[in-house]
Each structure stands twice: as structure tokens, then as C-alpha cells.
Image (cartoon, helix red, strand yellow):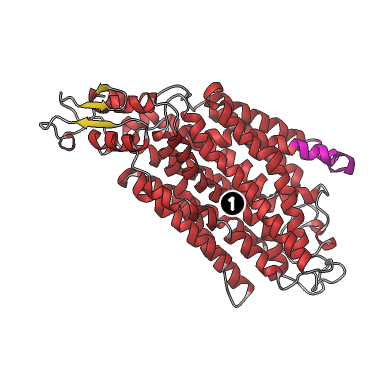
Amino acid sequence: MARKGKEVLNALDAAKTQMYHFTAIVIAGMGFFTDAYDLFSISLVTKLLGRIYYHVDGSKKPGTLPPNVAAAVNGVAFCGTLAGQLFFGWLGDKLGRKKVYGITLMVMVLCSLGSGLSFGHSSNGVMATLCFFRFWLGFGIGGDYPLSATIMSEYANKKTRGAFIAAVFAMQGFGILAGGIVSLIVSSAFDHAFDAPTYEVDPVGSTVPQADYVWRIVLMFGAIPALLTYYWRMKMPETARYTALVARNTKQAAADMSKVLQVDLIAEEDPQTNPSSTSNPNSFGLFSKEFARRHGLHLVGTTTTWFLLDIAYYSSNLFQKDIYSAIGWIPAAQTMNAVHEVYTVSRAQTLIALCGTVPGYWFTVALIDHLGRFFIQLMGFIFMTVFMFALAIPYDHWRHRDNRIGFLVMYSLTMFFANFGPNATTFVVPAEIFPARLRSTCHGISAASGKAGAIVGAFGFLYAAQSSDPEKTDAGYPPGIGVRNSLLMLGGVNFLGIVFTLLVPESKGKSLEELSREDEEQIGGGDATEMVNVENSGRTVPV
């Protein structure tokens, strides 16, 4: 890298932690708050959807979503997310991070509202409309992954970069928690306002007509936090690294830095130099041999570990309610009315989020720049493997009433080490180790691989977790391998995560340009020199 631009980026790496860093965390993090709320809140209301739209007269059990409908409702948002990660990841490198950042948020707002307003003349019509809006909701959510991660990594200083990116992702934990709390409040209010008998007493009367509002309110609430941060996203300047390294406009990069850092930077460019007229001989593309040589194994490492992690993570999160029912922590559906069942499921998932999910994220934030990404990811996969096998092998032991608390403790620890482990680091590392001109694209590819794993978990676990006894399966499902064998499979998936983590490099304490080897490349070429004057400190930085 020539001196031109290098010192501007060094100034970013050396910048002290300032209020704007925390502002950026909140602005980017509220997107992830909304992402998690929208993706996971559907699991709180799927049993209610089954009761409302697929009731069968004379059945001993409440209505449930048919297998194909349940798979679509749970998984279609992940399909949209995968597409959005690839598209917006690519677009973020082509047009710039800022230009497409607001688009993703507005898609999320509109589709959150649309999900709650789903309509149709039949049950399948309502579900089809819901799936349509949830696909495009996922598309907007997908764009938030590469853009938020890349923006935060390019704004951050070298010393605390890992904590800043992890803090953005940690807002996901609050989103999951908020989903449970909102669902608790809404279901509790409706349960008290519209008293209904249990299903076994009155199958039809157990689902009051007003229950149809419950799931709609829960899903629509996700639009509020996203809408509140739209204005501030539009005020964020383009990242200096994109401007300097991709747009090759060091003067503009310095001007943008002055807007967000507590220094006034003035770039005085040599008038004989035209950065846009020069070429970079090392601007290799994503599908080039040079990229494969430098970063091929890194991309394999980030994609495979995220894929394996999300199989286990999303199957566990989306189907917590089925696991709780299997061990008897949630009463049988027929012993509750429809709205009270939503309350019971929400209470269980909120407790897990509060005890295991949220703390795990913030342990990562606190320790990632001390322990390193590699150590935390490897440790997380190891503990997830141990706890998953510890749940699965003596599964019959955990099903006894006296041992249910122990099961929940073990399950909470599994979720804790997922979040104080690979669920955070798989998001952080791809935003650090690839060149600026491909950073958003490579993060999008890695994240899309993760969502492919989520789709496997969401669709596969629906069927796999069914009892092997045909008499005990949910309506419309074929016999599966049972919860115990499903947990064994997830333990095996976590073990593979340990193996592929060995391909992921450590990025702690290094600049983005050192990690991506852009410090070996020319930016702008020529021998011209710029002077960046730091007015409020009296320093002049040559670039």
C-alpha cells in the first residue's frame, strides 16, 4: 500500500473509542434486534396458528399446522434471508455500504407489517400470504448481515474492533428476549380479557375469535424498532475504508472521518494526482486464482463453520417448544386454551433467552479482544458438543419429573456456549479477513451458508424430532427418529464445527489491511503525497 490512504486508515485503527462508536453499535444493532425478533417470534405463535386455522372437529388434540405448511412458515424467511445476504452483500461492494443500508431496513418494516396483515379466504390462503411477506422480510433481514458487520468493522479501531462487531450481533439476543416478552404481554392480556376453557373441556370454545389478533400483533411489533432507526442510518456517512480502498478517494475519506471522529481532518491533495485514473494491479476478483490462493481456505472455513453452527442453533431455537413438551415442562396442549398455550411457550423461551442466550452474547463482547476469535469459537463448539451429547445419551433420565430442571440447566448452557462461541464469532471474522472490495460479498456468502444450515435445521428437525411411535407423532407427520436421536445428530454436527474451525485465522489485534493483505497493494499509485491536518490536535499526518 502506498503512503496515500494508508495513514488515513492508520488513524482509524488508532482512534480512541468515542461516542460515535457506541452510536454506530446502536444504529446497526437495532437492525439485528429486529432481525432476531422477526425470525424467532414466529416459533412463539405456530401452535396458535395451528389451532386457529387447522382445527379438526372431533380430534382429541388441538389443530396443528400440516407438515408442509409448518415447514414453509418456519423456513421461508430463511430462504429469503439467504437470497438477501448474497444480493445485498454483492451490492454493498458495488455501490457502497451506505447507499443500500436504508433499503434493507424499509423492506423489514413493510414486510413486518404485511406479515401481521396476512389475509385469505381459506386457511391455506392466509398461510400463503404470510409466507409471501415472510420471504421478503427475510430478504431485507439478509441484507442487514453483511452490511452491518462490514460497516462496524470499517468504523472500528483495531483494539476493540471485535467487541464492537460482536456488540452489534449481541443485539440479536435482546431481539429474541423482546419477542418472548411481547408475546407474554399480549397473550397474558388476551387470556385475562377473554376467558376460555381448555381444549379437553370445549375444543371449539378453547380458541376464542380474538386469538387471531394475538399472532398478528406479535409479528407486527417487529416493525417498530426498525422504523425508529431509519433516520439515523440515512445520516451515517460512507465508511472511510470503502471510500479510500474501493472508491480510491482519500480526500473524501478524510472528510467523512472528520464527521464521525472527534478530530477535524482536512485532506490536501496534490492537484497533479487523480486517484481515479490509476489502476491497482492487485485488484483480483472473487473467482480469481489469486483470491483462491490468498483467501480460499479462509472462505471455506467461514462458510462451513457458519453452516454447521446454524443447523444446531436454529433447530434448537425454533423447536424449543417441542423439546419442552417432550420432557413435560410445557403441559399437554389439550389441557390449555389457545392463548394460554402461547403464554406458556413464550414463558419457557423467555427464560432460556434470559438465562442462556443473552448472557452468552455479552460474554463474547467482553472477552473477544482478550481471548481471540479462534479460541472462543473452538471452545464454544467443544462445549456445545459435550452438552448436546450429555442431553442426548441419558435422555430418558432427563424426562423424569425430578430431573427436568437439570435438563433445562444443561440446555441453557448449550445455548450459552453457542452465543459465547461460534454464533458470535462466525459473524465477526468474515467482516475482518477479506479485502475491502470483496468484504461485504464474502460476508454475505458466509452468512448465506449459515442460513442454508438454518434451513436444514428448520425443515429437517420438524420431521426428525417426531416420535418413532406413530401413535405419538403430531397430526400429518410421519414417524421420525425422536428427540433423543435428533440431539445426537446435532452433537455430531457440533463436532464437525470443531474440525472446520481449524481453517479460520485469528484476527485479534491486527488491522483489516494486514489481515486482507491490502497493505501489500498499491492504492492510487504514483508518488504524490497528501497532508491530513488534524486541526484540533495540531498534528499533520502525511498520507
Specify start and end residues of the magenta stretch as a single range. 394-410
Which residue corresponds to the image point at 27% horizontal and 36% vertical from the top-left?
255
Q: Position of residue 53 (x, y in %)?
A: 68, 70
Q: Is residue 53 above or below residue 437?
A: below
* Magenta-span inclusion, residue 145: no
Which residue corresponds to the image point at 75% horizontal and 48% vertical from the top-left?
323
Which residue corresponds to the image point at 49% horizontal and 35% vertical from the top-left?
165
Q: Classify the position of the N terminus by image quarter.
A: top left
Q: Is residue 298 above or below residue 28?
A: above
Q: Amino acid at mark 1?
A: Tyr
Q: Secondary structure at mark 1?
A: helix
Q: Classify the position of the C terminus by image quarter.
A: top left
Q: Position of residue 421 (x, y in %)?
A: 60, 32
Q: Position of residue 344 (x, y in %)?
A: 77, 54
User: How many numbered circles does the render carry?
Assistant: 1
Image position of 395 (left or right of 176):
right
Q: Quadrant of residue 284?
A: top left
Q: Tell me if I can see residue 496 in this picture.
A: no
Q: Is residue 469 above or below residue 244?
A: below
* Tag 1 residue: 37
- Main SS of the magenta part reads helix
